Image (tube, helix red, strand yellow):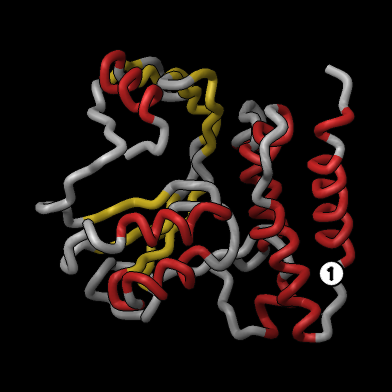
Amino acid sequence: MDYKDERAKQITRNGIQVDGLGGSFHVKVPVTTQPQFQDTDLVIICVKAGKTAEVARQLASTVPTKSLILSLQNGIGNIEILSETFGKDRVLGGVTSEAATLVAPGHVRHAGKGQTFVGPLNGNPSAVSEVVSIFNEAVHVARAKGIELPYPHPLSRVIDVCKATADNVASMLQDALNRRRTEVDFINAAIVREGKGLGIQIPVNTVLAELVNAIEKSYDVQIS
């Protein structure tokens, strides 16, 4: 499903070209702005975090009650938003260290290979075989909230992921380069908000969030 009709038609007509670590291949993918979900077992939500609530409202009346909803998105709060519409028993959370760069509509470069974790929100193992929550930064916030990180040395894990995806253009940088709203409020700024609620100072993420927000506010005065 795509929200842009012309892009949906283009991808349906031309397919998707994938280049990168696993070689190059081309696949045909039917895309529509008006999907039919009658026999759908799993709906994967990949929109920007700021669009999650809007998409949930759009899908609420069309997705069958048997369908599971998987959030494979950046940021904190997406699964909670989806749960308000679809219920906790149906919502899954996913995180991945796979990396991709959008070259053009229908053309993707696979720039980094990594692990993907998927787990249910309510802790029910019947939905998937493994329940894992992952945070890349702000270990103290995670511990204070009782969140068990899947890696003994999270910072080292972040560095490893950065090395593995060094050829990728991060999605937030892609947004900034294209003068689009980033997801920093749902990522770095979200960690800052959690820290404040727990009385924990989060200086690095505070600075990063403020810098990205400043870049966003300067879009209209930047010189190309």
Q: Quadrant of the C terminus?
A: top right
- 63 with respect to 216 (left or right): left
Left or right: where 213 falls relative to 172: right
Instruction: Tell me which amino acid carries mark 1.
Output: Ile
Residue 9: quadrant of the picture: top left
Eyeballing the image, is 148 above or below 27?
A: below
Q: In front: 61, or 48?
A: 61
Q: Height in image: 68 above or below 98?
A: below
Instruction: Give the image location of residue 59, x and y in percent.
Output: 31, 56
Name the residue that disc number 1 marks: 202
> Which residue is rendered at x = 72% and y = 68% of the image?
191
Relative to 57, is 90 on the left or the right?
A: left
Label 1: state its secondary structure: loop
The quarter of the displayed image where residue 17 is located:
top left
Total marks in image: 1
Q: Residue 3, image x and y in percent?
A: 40, 38
The spot of residue 181 in percent (x, y) is: 68, 43
Q: Nearer the viewer, residue 180 or 40?
A: 180
Q: Residue at x 41, y 32 (%)?
A: 4
Q: Check disc 1: other Cα within 10 Å, few if <14, some if 14-19, many if 20+.
A: many
